[in-house]
Image (cartoon, grey):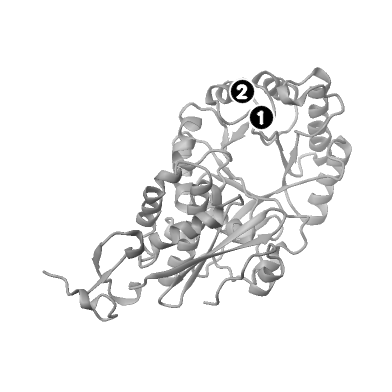
Amino acid sequence: MPVDYTQLHDPNAEYTMRDLSAGTMGIRAKRGGGRDVEITDVQTTMVDGNFPWTLVRVYTDAGIVGTGEAYWGAGVSEVIDRMTPFVVGENPLDLDRLYEHLIQKMSGEGSIEGTVVTAISGIEIALHDLAGKILELPAYQLLGGKYRDEVRVYCDCHAGEEEDPEANADEAERVVEELGYDALKFDLDVPSGHEKDRANRHLRNAEIDHKAEIVRAVTERLDGRADAAFDCHWAFSGGSAKRIARAIEDYDVWWLEDPVPPENHDVQREVSQSTTVPITAGENVYRKHGHRRLLEEQAVDVVAPDLPKVGGMRETRKIADLADTYYVPVAMHNVSSPVATMASAHVGAAIPNSLAVEYHSYQLGWWEDLVEESVIADGSIDVPEEPGLGLTLDLDAVEEHMIDGEELFDEA
């Protein structure tokens, strides 16, 4: 049947044109009913939190707006601007197709990993919020339903003097008793006073003893009241990582995170298989393809994707499914605002192998002010039943905390 191109901008026409700005001439039959929705714009605003959070909003001709978030990083907003023409005119309910569409359109700019995948993640999360609102379903329902009503949160803790084992223990006790968390994480890549040359990643015996002393002080002070994980931030050589793991095997360690740099999977595997201490990694790899070797080669005991960085909600679900085939649990890394934190909670509700979602802003007094709803209570997140992510941005709070030079979103 020939297409009447004079009807392309007629809302009652049988056909519409999409993706004109991307240079394609695809023609699609319009969907019927309330699902006949088109994306009209994508906008970003960066908030100056303890990390620079990139908030993303996807607008539609139905007046419904979806909100997402991309992991912080230079150039993310610019990449989202670059991709906006590729989704304008598209139906936001085509979640998988739009994700793959963006991956393919941005392949020349590096959609395997890095800033491009992070930018796509922000749009993808906003699409889940938007689709849930259109269909009047919570986002977890778009991922297959839920295993749990609440998702455990672990608090990333920072003592005033992080090199002091007892200061870390004091903070652990405070966070448990005053803030109600039963899962914590502390850093081990802190100065010990015994370093000679940190660039070579090799630890002297005194440095190993210092790391073990932090673990001892925290775990003994907690005395089983809370789980405690310890993060190395990819700082050590394979041999030093094995020695750290050996030195802390007698303590109650939830996991040891990222003990070696992320590029060499062989070393990661050797460290994991050398110790009874659970080893966690995954924050610094992208998409399910980046996590494949970690899981297939049993190089991790816990996998830790960062949802607004790794590819978004469905991609994190795919990583969790792959992990589940190897009986590996998922502890989502998260340094985000309430938006991506809640997106992580929806995924955590929808997967069987969820351990916890990280919270990295307990020392930032206005974190929860960015949304109208309560997010974390008593160390967990109650997964909302409201459509989409179940959050409402407080635009006044967003404007108050915007990075200098940023512009506030348009109203819906």
> x%, y% of residue 164?
87, 36
Judged left or right of residue 9, residue 77 is: right
> x%, y% of residue 133?
46, 71
Q: Is residue 385 visible?
A: yes
The kind of residue tagged 1 is Pro
The residue identified by callout 2 is 271
Q: Nearer the viewer, residue 180 or 102?
A: 102
Judged left or right of residue 76, residue 183 is: right
The residue identified by callout 1 is 259
Q: Nearer the viewer, residue 374 or 276?
A: 374
Relative to 399, does residue 144 appear above or below in the rendering?
above
Task: Tell whether label 1 touches label 2 (CB within 8 Å).
Answer: yes
The kind of residue tagged 2 is Val
Q: Earlier in the sequence, mark 2 or mark 1?
A: 1
- Helix, strand or loop at disc 2? helix
Q: Is residue 147 visible?
A: no
Q: Quadrant of the N terminus?
A: bottom left
Residue visible at 76% across and 34% down?
Answer: 188
Q: Nearer the viewer, residue 135 or 309?
A: 309
> x%, y% of residue 336?
63, 54
Residue visible at 37% across and 64% down?
Answer: 93
Which quadrant of the view contains residue 25? Answer: bottom left
Q: Residues within 10 Å of mark 1 (few under 14, many from 20)?
A: many
- Helix, strand or loop at disc 1? loop
Judged left or right of residue 275, residue 343 is: left
Q: Residues within 10 Å of mark 2 (few under 14, many from 20)?
A: many
Residue visible at 79% across and 27% down?
Answer: 212
Judged left or right of residue 273, residue 117 is: left
